[in-house]
Amino acid sequence: MTILYQGNIIQIGEFAPEALNEQMLITFKQDVPADLAEYCFVLQHGELLDDLAVGDVVELGGIDYPITAVGEIASFNFKQLGHISWRFNGATEPEYPGTVHLQGATPQTVTLGTELVIKRL
């Protein structure tokens, strides 16, 4: 197993938890513009060592979520901005170019300090 990324949630925007009700978690790195931060889970951003791929696993708060689809600009956006719309719906085709789809139940809550790890098995 290779660790491709490690980061922690350091800020939760006022409206960010509402996206969980839509099977979505939106991340951005710590220098996100204030108007966007209200809708994001803000990461103390680490380095993404390789592009994301179907079959990689996102570990969020100790729970593994296999990646089922990766939008064409998702890896670039995540490397540069820490930005991805993570969708917990198991789709095999990306909904949007910046979306990553995951298999598994949407987390009920995400708290400050939650670790986000991306692994390649």
Image (cartoon, rainbow, N blue to C red):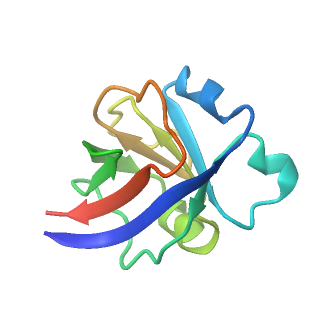
Residue 121: where, in percent of width, then height?
A: 13, 63
Determine the residue located farthest toward the right in the rendered image: 35
Of 22 and 10, which appears nearest the observer? 10
**Position of 94 relative to 34 (above/below):** above
**Position of 24 relative to 83 (above/below):** above
Residue 68: where, in percent of width, then height?
A: 29, 44
Report the side of 44 relative to 50 (left or right). Answer: right
Report the side of 25 relative to 93 (left or right). Answer: right
Q: Quadrant of residue 5?
A: bottom left
Report the side of 102 relative to 100 (left or right). Answer: left
Of 79 and 38, which appears nearest the observer? 38
Q: Quadrant of residue 10?
A: bottom right
Report the side of 4 relative to 80 (left or right). Answer: left
Of 10 and 3, which appears nearest the observer? 10
**Position of 97 relative to 50 (above/below):** above
Q: Considering the image in quadrants, where does the N terminus appear? A: bottom left
Q: Residue at x 32, y 72 (%)?
A: 4
Q: Residue at x 54, y 69 (%)?
A: 45
Residue 22: where, in percent of width, then height?
A: 55, 22
Q: Quadrant of residue 85?
A: top right
Determine the residue located farthest toward the front in the rendered image: 113
Residue 20: where, in percent of width, then height?
A: 54, 27
Q: Residue at x 25, y 57 (%)?
A: 56
Q: Residue at x 48, y 29 (%)?
A: 109
Of 8 and 72, which appears nearest the observer? 8
Instruction: Give the total of numbered labels.
Output: 0
